[in-house]
Image (spheres, coloured by chain):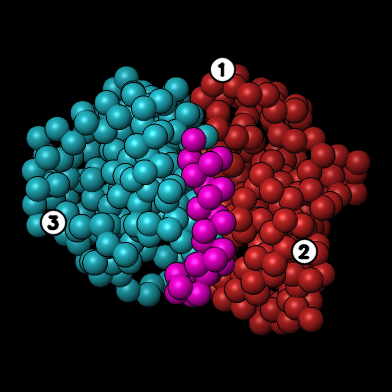
Chain colours: A red, B cyan
Amino acid sequence: MRYELYYWPSIQGRGEFVRLALEDAGAPYVNRPPQARPGVFAPPYLKAGRLLIGQTANILYYLGPRLGLAPRSEAARLWLHQQTLTIVDWLDEVHDTHHPIGSGLYYEEQKKEAKRRAHEFRGVRLPKFMRYFEASLGKRHSYVDLALFQMIEGLRYAFPRAMRRLERRHPRLVALHERVAQRPRIAAYLASGRRIAFNPHGIFRHYPELDER
Amino acid sequence: MRYELYYWPSIQGRGEFVRLALEDAGAPYVNRPPQARPGVFAPPYLKAGRLLIGQTANILYYLGPRLGLAPRSEAARLWLHQQTLTIVDWLDEVHDTHHPIGSGLYYEEQKKEAKRRAHEFRGVRLPKFMRYFEASLGKRHSYVDLALFQMIEGLRYAFPRAMRRLERRHPRLVALHERVAQRPRIAAYLASGRRIAFNPHGIFRHYPELDER
């Protein structure tokens, strides 16, 4: 089965969580630009044979056992999915640090509000999410590890100063990030032209004024 | 099996989406106040025998076929789950109309930003979500219908003027709301003391200054 991933071709965004799972598993897939379609609210969506699956967490839930990145038992799958949904909530909050008023407005039109929201995020929410995941990492490699790798990677890009401080207290997350980065297929992917660089159009954005001083 | 739902006892909030499914199915359950627990980021969470399941959408995914509120086929379950995840995104955006800066701050501390965000929500996001669901309602009763009922109900409470205008263009959603409200167990639940009234501590809040003029 060759999967087709529909997502914006110029950013990592939510699609990257799916790409990392496909790359780690060495699964055949192609990237396609998204189109307006009935039954899809927003990209990413995945075409898998006759199935069209929307919502990042839903796609990962579907792919998990098929890619060898999740066990097949119901309890284990629900647990990984619960973790994924929490990561997606975390990612939404990262997005809202630079777009607290609306996605349809430019950052510059909501910069003042972004500074306040980013301050709350760095001080309250980011430590809460990091503490939670530091304490609840799984033992077996799964697509959740890949998603956490991407969160750390993106947060380092967006908030380098805040992360430098926080990482000292979260050694297990730092070790997980390192372990994932060294997986042969992930290392090859990150070094390839297929990995889109972080940039000021994605979800993770580096605006120095939103980071710690 | 008697389910135990852990959620704040004073608000509908995210827990209400689970309560409506349990009530519609006539399933035995008890409400319990949430406690800090490892492996749970935030309420609601459901105890089902030995399973502890977090994240609203995940709980509904688990309960769906067990309560007769979802088919058992994988494709149908993924589709209902995709719809649920989109509803949960919508609900998050409702929350952020009154808390655009941070959940840890009072509304009064972010009222100015809330006015801007609510303006964007009413003008851009709310119509987009309503248009999407108006066009993609299912034929068979499911837990997604119950969730959409709750969205309409909450949005009418929070944004009565905006909804009056929008509902004219979304007759299928209005009809679905009416149909769900008349289901015998739902009607009995809504009339009972078990249904917590909307109030200024929940996710749906009525602040006239956030609604249309």
Chain of residue at mark 3: B
Residue B125 painted magenta = yes
- Give the residues in magenta: B101-127
Work out which quarter of the rendered image holds the N terminus of chain A and state it: top right
Q: Nearer the viewer, residue A194 or A143?
A: A194
- Residue A50: which disc? 1
> Mark 3 sits on what residue?
B194
Q: Secondary structure at mark 1?
A: loop
Give how far apart the Cα atoms at labels 3 and 2 are. Answer: 45 Å
Q: Are marks 3 and 2 on the same chain?
A: no
Specify whether B56 is left or right of B111: left
Quarter occupied by residue A23: top right
Q: Quadrant of the C terminus of chain A?
A: bottom right
User: Mark 1, residues whose alpha carbon is within 10 Å: few (<14), some, or many (≥20)?
Assistant: few
Q: Which residue lies under the disc numbered 2? A: A158
Which chain is mark 1 on? A
Amino acid type, label 1: Arg
